Image (cartoon, rainbow, N blue to C red):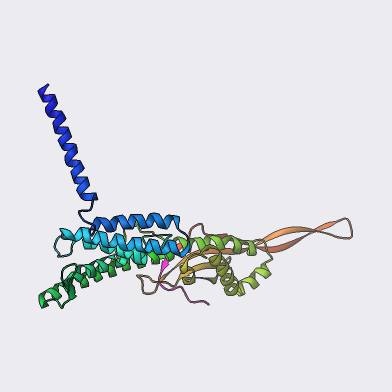
Amino acid sequence: MESLFKDVFGLFKFVGGLYEGIKKLLVPPKAYSWQTFIYLSVFSWALAYFAVGYISNIIAFLGWLFLIAGTAWYTTDDPLRVPGTFMPVGAVITGFLVSVFAFGNQEDIITPRTIVLWPTISALITAIPDFIEGNDTDAKAKIPKPEVREKIIILVASCMLISCWIQFYFVMDKWLTQYPSVLADNFQRSTFVVSRAVPKEIPENGVLILEQIQPIVEKQIAKRPWSEVEKWLLDAKKQVETLGNQVINANLAELEEKELWRVEPRVSNIKSGYRLDLLSIWSGPSSNSQGYYLQKSCRIEPIAVSARTAIITTSQVEDKNTVAEIECDRLSKLMAGAPPPQQ
């Protein structure tokens, strides 16, 4: 029975201690305290939810100011430092809130600009107290001592460098989104870019262009009279470039890299007819100084077909006509270097 009373007493003591801790955290010891600012921010956002128009924006703006002030006050009462620096953790938290407040938006609160400027803003917030002396009611500006100024310059410069590297990450991410063919390149010799993606052996968009243009070319050549096909091949540059532009605009319309692809033909004589090489040429950045291109080769040969022509008499004669037959490679080949000159 005695142990039961001890357990109950211990439970009440624990609950009482927990209650006192929560009360100390939530109940302001005086009107002018950090809890008051936090409560004002919550109250402002509640009012902004029910308000409309510019009144709602003004109240929400005040709510952000109260939240930033309350957070800064609370985290600087007993500051915890970021390891290896004199930057308080509170300045990092306050810097994040300031960055979100200044550069966020209603659709997306956390934007790339928010993340990029966060370290620099946190460093500036850390430096502000060194330029102020006095207490809460009587404060004035001052110039820090040389050794303090040196620490501030190093901290701000370091955080600006971090912001630059974060910005570089977002720039690279945007480039690789708009120019996915760059991922097919080799980054092993790069001193500042590390590709964690599985390297692609061949650029997919270059393959897509040739796969889309192949059936169109086949349709324009197959089973047409040989004389017409030879005229088409004489004008192949114009024909293929026009078709290539149509395919690129139709399949890569949403990508910036569409301006860096072009399609050209190469026509050469072979023993049995002609060879038509369709080239999708990449003119964007490449680890190879001469770039690269993809090639799909097609063989065009004449074949004889029979057609029965009716004569006025009941007899029939056979007249032989020559038409074109085209056969293209199944896969595209990746070729390093500049494309061969046009003949």
Please give the name of the residue rendered at 51% of the width and 76% of the height, measured from the top-left corner: 342
Magenta stretch, overall SS:
loop
**Within the magenta stretch, is there residue 171?**
no
Residue 192 visible in this rendered orientation of the protein: no
Q: Nearer the viewer, residue 110 or 267?
A: 110
Q: Residue furthest top?
A: 1
48 relative position to 262: left or right: left
- The residue closer to the viewer here, 86 or 193, is 86
Q: How many marks?
A: 0
Corner quadrant of residue 181: bottom left
Percent from the top left, x then y, of residue 39? 30, 55
Q: Nearer the viewer, residue 117 or 282?
A: 117
Q: Position of residue 5 (x, y in %)?
A: 13, 26
Q: Is residue 101 visible?
A: yes
Quadrant of image for the N terminus: top left
The residue that appears at 86% across and 60% down in the rendered structure is: 311
Q: Which residue appears farthest toward the right when viewing the image?
A: 313
Horizontal arrangement in the rendering, residue 176 relative to residue 148 (left or right): right
To which quarter of the image does residue 132 belong?
A: bottom left
Residue 19, image x, y percentages? 21, 42
What segment carries the magenta color? Answer: 334-343
Q: Position of residue 155 (x, y in %)?
A: 18, 70
Q: Nearer the viewer, residue 309 or 167?
A: 167
The residue at 57%/74% (across/down) is 237
User: Outermost residue toward the front?
Assistant: 31
